[in-house]
Image: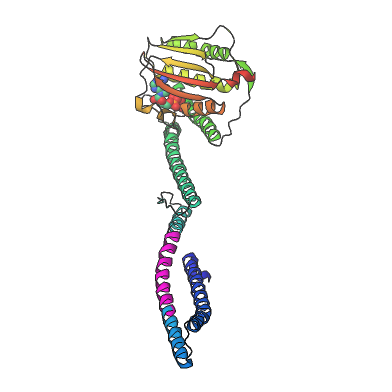
Amino acid sequence: MNRLGLRGRLLVAQIVVLLVCCVTIAAVAVAIAAPLFHNHLAMAGIEDDNVRLHTEEAFSQTIFVALLSGIAVALVGASIAAVYVVRRITAPISRLAVAAQSVAEGKYDVHIEHSDVDSDFTRLEGAFSDMAERLDHSDRVRKRLLADLAHELRTPVSTLAAYVDGLEDGVLEADGTSWAVMRDQLERLRRLAHDLSDVSAADEHALDLILAADDLSDIVCSTTTAVAPRFEERAVTLSTATPAHPVRVRVDRQRIEQILSNLLENALRHTPGGGSVAVAVTESPDHISVAVSDTGEGIPEDQLESVFDRFHRGESSDGSGLGLTIARSLARAHGGSLTARPNPLGGTILELALPGQLASDT
Ligand SMILES: Nc1ncnc2c1ncn2[C@@H]1O[C@H](COP(=O)(O)OP(=O)(O)OP(=O)(O)O)[C@@H](O)[C@H]1O
Ligand SMILES: [Mg+2]
């Protein structure tokens, strides 16, 4: 029976039901028709035994032939209908089985035609499609991540290798310049390792936050104070606007500083001398936000979202393209958001929004 498969089993079940139906109809018809016809002959006043016997025999034969023909036609018609119905029911299951087999073999790019057999089955198809799509997406992200990572590692590692070889062969002198270049490349590798561990922690939703009551204005001021000398050096004006009263929040201070430092670092990197960067803390009924607005080169409209993707970086950047990815993950871990939009004055505004209830928690 197992070898029949679902389709065969359903067909056999339908044919068995059909046969039971036909046999029951025939048995009941025979059992009722003969005595009924006999009674009718008696009521019609046919007394002659010979005539009665012949008439009843003729009736029995007629009934027998009619029932047999009816059953034969019904069996053929019902079998055709059963094959059609069983095919309709089992085709989507077969399609799903083929798709599941592909996914099991690592081919996630499957397309499932949605059937209308049953609402639960349609839900199953939908869930399967979503699952395959997610697996496909994760697989592509993983491959891209590995390729990007290999690319990121290649430059500092080959620079270091070239310097070590040059020093060993005596082609390069072990002077301040060589050490500075090597230290730079090592620092780049160290930062990359650090950033990658943050990105992977964010992917696993494992960013540890040490939440404590704090004043957001104070966090903003201490971050801007720390970076102010570098802005002065580059002749970029840095201004800060915060409410006169403390803005109470419950956050991980170091992580918020990390977000703001990244935004300020980006703003400085992409704003030419003579430009300005303004940091403003504002409160609204449902959220508290910190906007970092610069008058620099700006982010093209079609990249306002993709700048948050891992390893996305502009041509002029010498970073690893992970800063905004980490900053957004940290903002989300706080229950907030980080978005980019064009600055009406030219340049970009990056806005960190923290949910309002953070304030009332404190
Ligand atoms: N204020 C800004 N103005 C213009 N472009 C920006 C700005 N901020 C970010 N970008 C663009 O977004 C890209 C991604 O920024 P992100 O901070 O993620 O990476 P990065 O600065 O290149 O490297 P790092 O990992 O060192 O931060 C940048 O390379 C840059 O092209
Ligand atoms: Mg950056």
Indicate whether 124 appears above or below 306: below
Q: Nearer the viewer, residue 192 or 349?
A: 349
Image x and y of residue 343, in percent: 38, 16
Indicate whether 275 appears above or below 176: above
Indicate the quadrant where residue 95 lies. bottom left
Q: Which residues are magenta?
A: 67-91
- Determine whether, in the image, residue 171 is placed left or right of residue 32: left
179 within the magenta span: no
Image x and y of residue 339, in percent: 45, 24
Q: Nearer the viewer, residue 147 or 338?
A: 338
70 within the magenta span: yes
Indicate whether 101 appears above or below 33: above
Determine the residue positioned at 41% across, 66% down: 81
The colour scheme used to paint the residues is rainbow
Is residue 41 in sight in this rendering?
yes
Q: Nearer the viewer, residue 44 or 13?
A: 44
In the orientation shown, which residue stands out farthest toward the front? Answer: 45
Magenta stretch prevailing secondary structure: helix
Marker count (numbered) = 0
Q: Nearer the viewer, residue 195 or 36?
A: 36
The image quadrant where one finds the C terminus is top right
Image x and y of residue 145, in percent: 45, 38
Is residue 178 in sight in this rendering?
no
Image x and y of residue 291, in percent: 47, 16
- Determine whether, in the image, residue 37 is placed left or right of residue 295: right
In the orientation shown, which residue stands out farthest toward the bottom? Answer: 50
